[in-house]
Amino acid sequence: MSKQNGQEGPWVFPKTRASRAEYLEFVKVLQGVGTTCSRFFRKVMREVIGQGPDLLPIEMKPIKEATFQVAALGRNLNQILKAFLAGQSPPPGILVDQAALAAFRDQVEELKQALVSVVLRSKHRWLKHE
């Protein structure tokens, strides 16, 4: 076991055997999902032994989009609350009532479900499906 700067380094490097054709196709897949061979194998190992999920760059896209949407909702809510606390009427076109709050809650719940779906899909990728 090697140590670098007081931290444990890689202990074992798994080796594999594949034909040239298999390897070239695997490299195409790695490029398609935006990762390296080393990171891919670490991802698989971590998920199989229950230390995942470790999301690939392609899987991070929905999370980044959801983060942007949550931030936009937060900005809108902040503007409404500022106006309310200052005694001003809400910005034009914005009605603050039970229906608007319910719609806001529904959007947040929809984003939450989308994020949970991405994480669970990654987490359960390597489980046997019967």
Image: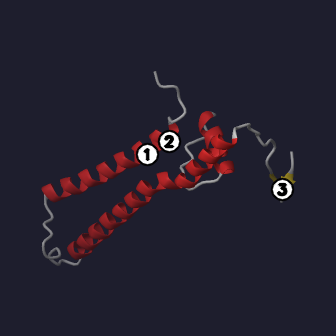
Q: Secondary structure at mark 3?
A: loop
Label 2 vs label 3, nearer the camera: 2
Residue 67 image offset from top left, x and y in percent: 40, 60
In the image, 21 versus 45, the foreground residue is: 21
Of all residues, the one furthest to the top in this rendering is 130
N-terminal-most mark, 2 or 3? 3
Q: CA gap, disc 2 to disc 3?
A: 32 Å
Residue 58 image offset from top left, x and y in percent: 49, 54
In the image, 76 versus 14, the foreground residue is: 14
Label 3 vs label 1, nearer the camera: 1
- Which disc number belongs to residue 122? 2
Up-down: is 65 above or below 109? Answer: below
The residue depicted at 56 percent of the width and 56 percent of the height is 34
Q: Label 3 amino acid?
A: Gly
Q: Label 2 amino acid?
A: Ser
* Image side of residue 122 versus residue 100, left or right: right
Residue 62 placement: quadrant: bottom left
Q: Which residue is mark 1?
A: 118
Q: Which residue is mark 3?
A: 6
Q: Quadrant of the N terminus?
A: top right
Q: Secondary structure at mark 2?
A: helix
Circles 2 and 1: CB distance less than 8 Å?
Answer: yes
Residue 33 image offset from top left, x and y in percent: 53, 52
The residue depicted at 87 percent of the width and 49 percent of the height is 2
* Image side of residue 59 versus residue 97, left or right: right
Q: Secondary structure at mark 1?
A: helix
